Amino acid sequence: MVKNLLSLINKGKFFYVLSLLFLALYIISLFLNLGVAPFYNEEPRRSIIAMEMLFNNNFMVTTLFNDVFYDHPPLWNIILAGSSWLFGTDTEFAFRFPSALSLLLTGVLVYLMGKKHVGQLFGTVSAFLYLVSVDLYFFFSNTAEIDIFFSLLIFTSIMGIYHFYEQKRFVSLYLYTYFFCFLGFLTKGVVSLVFLGVSLLIFFMYKKDYRKLFLPIHFLSAFLCLGGIAMFFYVYGQYDDAYAYIEGMWRITRNKSILDKANNAFLAHFFWFPINMLGNLFPATLLIPFLFKKSVVQKIKEHPYILFLIIVFFSNFIIYWISPGAKARYTYMFYPMLISILTFAFLMGKNRKGWKTKILFGVLSCLSLLLGISCFALPFINYFDTIEGVAFFSILFGICGLTLFLFQLKTHNIWNKLVFGLMGIVLCKLVFSLTVYPLKQQKSSSATFKNHAKNILKITKDAPIHLYSEFDFFDHHKIGKFYTTGAYLELLGNQLTRKTSTFKEKGYYILLKEELKGQKVLYTIDNRTSCLVLIKNEEEHPETWSHIPESSAYQNGVLR
């Protein structure tokens, strides 16, 4: 029986069975416990904006605590609002689902483009390596952040250039690329125009086919895209100041680019930025050595699709490389390009007995071995005692990890061996989802602020809640960790939490302790940088509780 099993896993046709099993486990791991951990980083802000779109029935103007907030255009927030409407407004899953789905859809596009222009094996392997890249898979696909979705739009637009150019379908090329560029603008602003403009110019220059840039359909497509953008601002202007919105969008773009004079860490950024990005590509990073072979370089030069990816990558990446304000997540659209290039190098330069191949499979098999051993140790570590079912799933995944390690040792078919290795990473993600997310739910600082919201809502019930401050404490740049509590007040309370500088209305008010003037404190939120209290206003008079506030000891987040 063992011999039959070993014979089966070494057959070439078994690769397709393994691939289906890999995908099934991957999809489970991607969405498992997605809504368990409380909001963190910028998720509270994203969720507040999306919820207030639903509360206000206005999908053009973005607001925070019912105060206009000039940020990116609204498409991503509309998608989050739609997801929360679909799955319910009281679950973090609704706000993280679109990002996880965007990662999966990008993987599908990597596969389709790879299969079409190189081959099915290349498409499958490059898609799998992209889907398990650690930064995307373990972290950012589990958040309500904008970047993976925006990268999907940009990558889709740029892939249309090559796909339709090869078919000489220039009408489809320009209409398709500019349509997704328009969606990119509605997601993150002017940077999508830069991506498409640079990619089109560099590609047609490389092809020495300049005249195709001056086709009437190009001008029509560009006109439709810019016209759509102008129409967006016109409609926005019916609700709010469009010029202030444009100024706010440009300020965000400028602050993250080399145009911002305050960014003075150029040399450190220039050195570490590409290294950080390559690290985020793991395990595809292990394929870098395969590039350093003369025959591989020659085959890359001869393949038009891989050359296209290299040209587009370098022509656009340089913009981020020289911009100290850029962060790694702004470059996610480059990940499928780089991984496809590295996968091609692996396909062309693989040598079953070579040291590069041994390092690749050695690292992957060690991960499976470490997973198996670590899982058996989990039940004996007190820190994990509070996790439900830890004894059961630790044994299950421990056995699975060691089994995968054994399969990798006994498998001689290089592609089956690779999929077994990548399955080990998927098992790591399953264990990660079953342990880290429940621990965050129980012990993270975000969990504390979520509990504050629950406790406040037990007191206020369905009554309105206002955020009062004469120090403008609830400004976006000063609010700090209260963002998390504020988000859950809206999500769990299912109503707007409004900023105000007066006590004109009945209801409950949250304010700095320094701004109290004898009112009864119903609840206190105390942390390192601020102390907030909940009070109730029973009367509906503007003069109620009028007072001259003391100077805040917590202003600007620094205790004086």
Image (tube, rainbow, N blue to C red):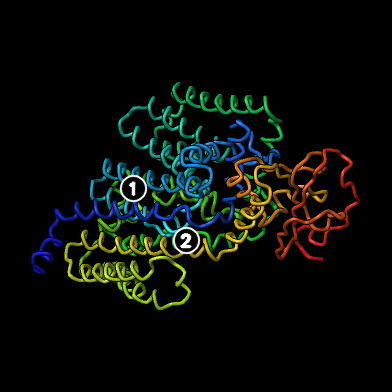
Q: Which residue is mark 2?
A: 437
Q: Residue at x 17, y 70 (%)?
A: 410
Q: Position of residue 39 (x, y in %)?
A: 55, 54
Circle 2 SS class: helix
User: Is 405 placed above or below 324 here?
Assistant: below
**Residue 503 location (% of width, % of height):** 82, 43
- Most extreme residue toward the bottom is 380
Q: Is 511 positioned to the left or the right of 315 in the image?
A: right
Q: Residues within 10 Å of mark 1 (few under 14, many from 20)?
A: many
User: Would you place residue 388 above or below residue 15 in this image?
Assistant: below
The correct choice, above or below, for 266 with respect to 466 in the image is below
Residue at 27%, 40% (x, y): give it: 116
Image quarter where the N terminus lies is bottom left
Q: Nearer the viewer, residue 485 or 200?
A: 485
* Quadrant for the C terminus in the image: bottom right
Name the amino acid type tagged 1: Ile
Identify residue type, mark 2: Tyr
Number of numbered callouts drawn: 2
Classify 10 Å Cα crowding around label 2: few (below 14), some (14-19), many (20 and above): many
Q: Quadrant of residue 447?
A: bottom right
Question: Which residue position holds label 1?
Answer: 306
